Image: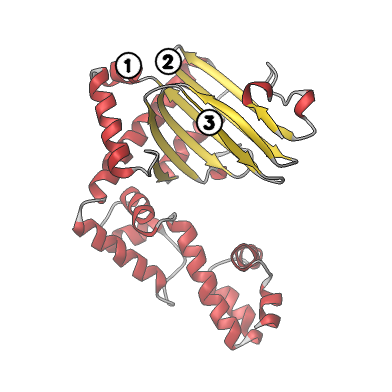
Amino acid sequence: MQLNMRDVYDNAGNIKEEVAPWLSGHKQLFSLLPSLQLINQHLSSNADVSIHEEAQSGIYFSFLASGPIKTAKDINSVQITYQPKNINGQFMMAKGDEHSLLQTRISPVQLAAILGETEDQIIQHFTAMGEKLGNEHGIIQLPITERTMSSMDLILAHKGHSISLAGHLYSVIFTLIEQLQMLSHLSQCEDCQSKLFHAQNLIETPEHDALNIKRLAQQVGLNTEALEIGFNLIVGQPIEHYCTRSRIKSAAAQLRQDPSAKPHIVAQSGFSEDQFEAAFIQHFGVSSHQYGQIH
């Protein structure tokens, strides 16, 4: 099935009746200024579909999730990209896929006016950042940090005037621009990278306590935001995900040795029993009880 994104939602942001057999979801669009927009979009596919989409030129700050974005905790990652011209493209959704996006787009000229720069300076900056830190498409990945989450919760909970919403958006944009500068520094600072590898080694030690980002940052000599951003750069995944995976892998090794010691292993892991089982299923695809029987 081939669809055009323009035909998916009605004016109220609901899925149009004619495409409801294939898709479900919602879309909220806030045009705060001529050059500043915010979209909160969720799509769930009931069949294999190909969707044609058009994207305007501009600087995009995108927050991605696997399910509807209601709070900042639902966000998995952040993407930043500069799109110099309007483009058209296709993306595929298999049956059962979910696509969630909270995205703000701002023009270089608008951002330049706010920051006291020229449009050319803004374009050059984001082009250089995309070439240096982005993938082959110029998309830069950032983890969702505690600081970003606090700002995003203000946006998601906003119910007042659009001017105050624009203020919250600018705050998030400024935060992400600062994080880009931090990411650039971390990508070339050998001393910082050594501290990040030290943090990774500490997490891997069996006796390491449950993750406390602030304490771990102090141990290795970084601030918490540098640790979160740098760890994602060096290891390729958010520090919380890595820590959970590391502890579950350690617990699995102990279960293989002594399945009867499960209560002690759960207590030692720092998780509640429900958290332990959820993490176990997410990582291994089976419960810890089933895992013990298999191994």
Q: CA distance from mark 2 to mark 1?
A: 8 Å
- Mark 2 is on which residue type? Ser
Q: Secondary structure at mark 2?
A: loop
Q: Which quadrant of the figure contains the C terminus?
A: bottom right
Say which of 156 and 186 sits in front. Answer: 186
Q: Earlier in the sequence, mark 2 or mark 3?
A: 2
Q: Are marks 2 and 1 in contact (CB under 8 Å)?
A: yes
Looking at the image, which residue is at 53% across and 24% down? Answer: 54
Say which of 222 and 114 sits in front. Answer: 114
Left or right of residue 188: residue 68: right
Question: Which residue has dot 2 on it?
Answer: 35
The picture quadrant where one finds residue 25 is: top right
Looking at the image, which residue is at 53% across and 68% down? Answer: 270
* Residue, far top: 34
Left or right of residue 117: residue 15: right
Q: CA distance from mark 2 to mark 3?
A: 22 Å
Would you place residue 5 above or below residue 244 in this image? Answer: above
Would you place residue 266 above or below residue 42 in this image? Answer: below
Q: Residues within 10 Å of mark 3 (few under 14, many from 20)?
A: few
Say how the picture is coloured: secondary structure
Q: Are marks 2 and 3 in contact (CB under 8 Å)?
A: no
- Mark 3 is on which residue type? Gly
Looking at the image, which residue is at 40% across and 41% down? Answer: 147
Residue 137 x %, y %: 40, 39
Question: Which residue has dot 1 on it?
Answer: 109
Residue 60 x %, y %: 43, 29
Q: Earlier in the sequence, mark 3 or mark 1?
A: 3
Say which of 147 and 143 sits in front. Answer: 143
Would you place residue 181 above or below residue 12 in this image? Answer: below
Q: Secondary structure at mark 1?
A: helix
Question: Which residue has dot 3 on it?
Answer: 89
Residue 88 x %, y %: 51, 26
